[in-house]
Image: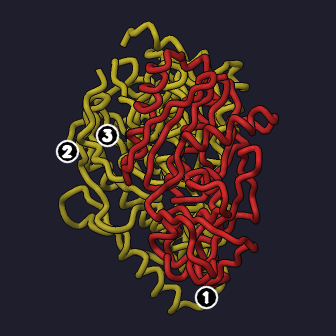
Chain colours: A yellow, B red
Amino acid sequence: MDNQQFSKPVLGIETSCDETGVALLRWEPAAPGRGLLAHTLYSQIKLHADYGGVVPELASRDHVRKLLPLVREALAEAGLTPADLGGVAYTAGPGLVGALLVGAAAARAMAWALGVPAIGVHHMEGHLLAPLLEDDPPAPPFVALLVSGGHSMLVEVAAIGDYRILGDTLDDAAGEAFDKTAKLLGLPYPGGPALAALAGQGRHGAFRFARPMTDRPGLDFSFSGLKTQVLLAWQQSDRREQTRADIALAFEEAVVDTLLIKCRRALATTGARRLVIAGGVGANRRLREELAKAGQQDGFSTYFPRLAFCTDNGAMIALAGAIRLAAGQHQGEAVQVFPRWDLETLPPAD
Amino acid sequence: MNLLAIETSTEACSVALVHGEEVIARSELAPRRHAELVLPMADALLAEAGVGRHALDAIAVGRGPGAFTGVRLGVALAQGMALALDVPVVPVSSLAALALEAPREDAAILAVIDARMGEVYAACYRRGDDGTLQPLDTERVCAPEALVLPAAEAWQVVGSGWAAYAEILRERLGVEPLAADGACYPQARHVAELAVREFRAGRALPPEQALPVYLRDKVALTLVERGKA
């Protein structure tokens, strides 16, 4: 990873769903976070709230409006011009095809115009490398828990680019379960963070929900049944504000406890001593606290990205892209996106 | 001047290069392959003309209307190139570019693209005495049956809307068109031709202001509209 060109900054572009993220990063292998020169983000949450969920066509339309202003902002923040760039990285998948295409086309065209390499990044690789941007970055091997609105998976990271999926969700992703449960409890879209805030006012032990799939071996998740339990509990309750908070707390505890049980199991299975947490649900305070506590008890280290890098962002794409560009990898001139893309098929990055 | 033009809003994918007085182009009918074709086509044109990327003065793009994904692809490519090269973008109507496919000088032009879902994108034009294209109305999306056309003695029709709705369009025109071609599409060489005039008239834009024109802007129902709020 000593390619001379990659002392130059890499532009990272993320447009796989409803956030437009842009970052500039100079690859510094010893401390990647120190190479982060700028990052900017525009969230479309307000745009989609009226529709009760992400509308793919509207997401694509918004990316094409917001991307260039964000690129300009990031360049200005870093005091750079496009001519200073050594490469361009973009999320090539998985995600919404139309949304991915906006970022991929603009990124690929910029690289073409500048005569620098471009690299399509796997969105989930971006997430699981995001903790490398923090102080004291984790070195492989480690186990990563990726939990977001679209994913719940446990991944064994033997080396950067060498990923084995240990467990995945069979139905709803953890973040999706948060959002759907919030909706059942009458909280506005996207309800996940609101649900977590409400749980803060709940009373322990008022309700208790099952920890799905923890009573059998394996590392897969299933959260859709939990939603049904919540619905029944709510319908049969007095529906007072305190009850709503109690149910929210019991739901959050069930999800966090389930994730914790599976993380412990994954660490035991692989013998890894480091646990990386990434994805939007990684911003959940109870999850962060419980995993850190378990780490102290069991003797494993936990690594969390800062909150802004738990959710979708350009910095993680710039990082994953910079690592692969430094390894000499890049894409041809075809603008290609992969709405479905298996993480395990990625090539090693060194 | 050197100007690169991209048109990907319909089934045809094309790129053109204006180099001094010369215009060269690549075009392919390649539904679903636009994303892989544009940059290699651009490379081939620049190599043929011996023009470097940094010698480009502007990027032009057919900004729609057309297929949403195709329109966005072209605009995002043009934006990315222009930002990197620090040159402006000249967005051009894909219907106007389509109108330049019309063969005759002596008849009004109906440019009409099949918009799916029972509608068309349409606009009418006339060739001016100086050879320029003059709009007779404004571009819109509507059912072909609802198309209201300006008065003209003679017509010619271009675009996939004719292939889909020839009978209905004949009724709307009230006359048999002197020429009609349902198998022609907006082409980058015509985007380039229109863009050169726009550029010289000072109507090039910073790349972030060159945005798609979809015409169909209602693409989803809100919770309130679905009665679920």
**Secondary structure beneath label 2:** helix
Residue A1: quarter of image: top left
Residue A26 visible (yes or no): no
Name the kind of residue labelled 1 in the image.
Arg
Name the kind of residue labelled 3 in the image.
Val
Going 52% across and 42% down the picture, which residue do you hit? A103
Going 23% across and 49% down the picture, which residue do you hit? A166
User: On the picture, is A57 further left or further right than A208?
Assistant: right
How far apart marks 1 and 3 lie (CA) works out to 40 Å
Dot label at residue A143: 3
Q: Chain of mark 1?
A: A
How far apart marks 1 and 2 lie (CA) works out to 42 Å
Q: Mark 1 or mark 3, which is nearer to you?
A: 3
Dot label at residue B91: none
Have a look at marks 1 and 2 and say if they share a chain. yes
- Which residue carries the number 1 mark? A239
Dot label at residue A269: 2
Mark 2 surroundings within 10 Å by alpha-carbon count, few (fewer than 14), some (14 through 19), many (20 or more): few
Have a look at marks 2 and 3 and say if they share a chain. yes
